[in-house]
Image (cartoon, grey):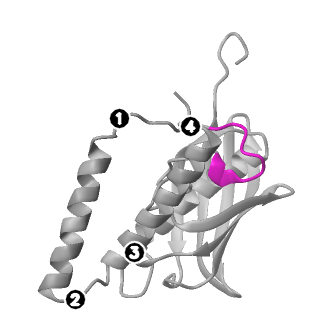
Amino acid sequence: MSASEEQRQQLRRISTQLSEILDSSQTLGGSDKELAEIETALSKLNSKMTALRDRKLLEFYNPDFAGDFRNILPCSPISGYFNPIAPDLRIWQEQDRVYAEGRFGKIHEGPPDCVHGGIISAVYDQVLAFAALANELPSLTASLTVKYRKPTPLLTPIRFTTWLEKRKDRHIIIHGECHSGDMLLSSAEGLFIMYKKNSTGN
């Protein structure tokens, strides 16, 4: 069963609400009474959602992403619109490069007021793979090296830029950088292996 357009919009709004709830939970405070009320409300919501689980309406992969790379893997924890822990990034292609731009919230915090390095690495893994796809070279990650130069601040506009460095047979090297304004925060190099076509050419 697949989702109707109305259901897709409802699920996306639910994901947005859950994302805001998770972000708020990281700095939540209040009286015993206020926290008890939130706990009770969430318990009721959890019971309601549990009763509807395992009826998934969304596809795992969407090849018709219409230029918006966040549509490719709808439930990805890194780029999916329907995953509440995914960073709020706009991901797009210009010529042979792929860019990701946005901010990270409190749910992505590692050091105080900074993004966890593992989250940065995961974003690189995703957007470098998208760069391969943008160059019509669908591939899987073989290795990824990230160099952290400065901490990535939370709640601050940042931009990832990725580009194809070279290709040899099925092996592809893709580079990426992350900036905040003019400041270089990190860089990455990924080795990707192109999907091997089967005997039917698919």
- What residue is shown at x 61% (from left), y 60% (from top)? 189
Amino acid marked by disc 2: Gly
**Residue 25 as seen in the image, left or right of residue 35:** right
- Disc 2 is placed on an element classified as loop
Task: Give the residue at mark 3.
Answer: 23
Give the number of marks.
4
- What residue is shown at x 54% (from left), y 81% (from top)? 149
Residue 107 included in the magenta stretch of the image: no
Q: Nearer the viewer, mark 4 or mark 3?
A: 4
**Residue 184 rendering spot, x and y as whole percentages:** 64, 82
Confirm or deny contact between disc 4 and disc 3 (CB under 8 A).
no
Q: Quadrant of residue 56?
A: top left
Residue farthest to the right? 95
Which quarter shows the C terminus?
Answer: top right
Task: Give the residue at mark 1.
Answer: 54
Q: CA distance from mark 2 to mark 1?
A: 34 Å
What segment is highlighted magenta in the picture? 62-71
Q: Which badge, 4 or 3, comes first in the chain's sequence? A: 4
- What residue is shown at x 72% (from left), y 53% (from top)? 68
**Residue 175 rendering spot, x and y as whole percentages:** 67, 61
Q: Is residue 18 above or below residue 115?
A: above
Amino acid marked by disc 3: Asp
**Residue 90 as seen in the image, left or right of residue 106:** right
Q: Which badge, 2 or 3, comes first in the chain's sequence? A: 3
Q: Dot 1, how many residues are within 10 Å of its Cα: few (below 14), some (14-19), or many (20+)?
A: few
Q: Which mark is residue 3?
A: 4
**Residue 163 as seen in the image, left or right of residue 118:** right
